[in-house]
């Protein structure tokens, strides 16, 4: 798996969890102090997020960091 594929799979996993939690991109963004566009870029695999950003995402989704990586 190359970098682009991995980032797309990670983004897709985050989107699935967010939808399962009944959250919009805007709601997730607001819960972690980001803007909706940053969540959109993350979910589409267009950014390579830092570990801290993924930690914030996990907190906003109320899941453990490791749960983001079940891809």
Image (spheres, helix red, strand yellow):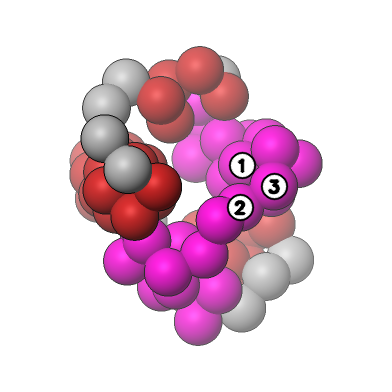
Q: Mark 1 points at which residue?
A: 54
Q: Where is residue 55 in the image (x, y as percent from the top left)?
A: 67, 36
Q: Residue 66 carries which label?
A: none
SS type, badge 2: loop
Please tell me how crowded label 3 is: few (under 14), some (14-19), or many (20+) other residues with Cα within 10 Å. few
Position above or below: 6 against 26: above
Q: Position of residue 62 (x, y in %)?
A: 53, 31
Residue 4 included in the magenta stretch of the image: no
Q: Name the residue under label 3.
A: 50
Q: Name the residue under label 2.
A: 49
Position above or below: 24 against 50: below
Regarding residue 50, the answer to whether it shows in the image is: yes
The reply to whether the C-beta atoms of the residues labelled 1 and 2 are less than 8 Å apart is: yes
Residue at position x 37%, y 61% in the image: 45
Residue at position x 50%, y 82% in the image: 37
**Magenta stretch prevailing secondary structure:** helix
Magenta part of the chain: 36-63
From the viewer's perspective, tell me whether residue 52 is left or right of residue 26: right
The reply to whether the C-beta atoms of the residues labelled 1 and 3 are less than 8 Å apart is: yes
Residue at position x 50%, y 17% in the image: 66
How far is mark 2 from mark 3, CA to CA? 4 Å
How far is mark 1 from mark 2, CA to CA? 7 Å
SS type, badge 3: loop
How far is mark 1 from mark 3, CA to CA? 6 Å
From the viewer's perspective, tell me whether residue 15 is left or right of residue 49: left
Q: Where is residue 51 in the image (x, y as percent from the top left)?
A: 70, 38
From the viewer's perspective, tell me whether residue 20 is left or right of residue 44: left
The reply to whether the C-beta atoms of the residues labelled 2 and 3 are less than 8 Å apart is: yes
């Amino acid at each position: 798996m190359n970098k682009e594929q991995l980032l797309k799979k990670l983004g897709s996993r985050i989107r699935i969890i967010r939808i399962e939690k009944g959250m919009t991109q805007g709601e997730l963004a607001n819960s972690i102090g980001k803007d909706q566009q940053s969540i959109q870029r993350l979910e589409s695999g267009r950014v390579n997020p830092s570990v801290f950003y993924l930690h914030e995402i996990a907190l906003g989704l109320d899941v453990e960091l490791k749960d983001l990586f079940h891809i």
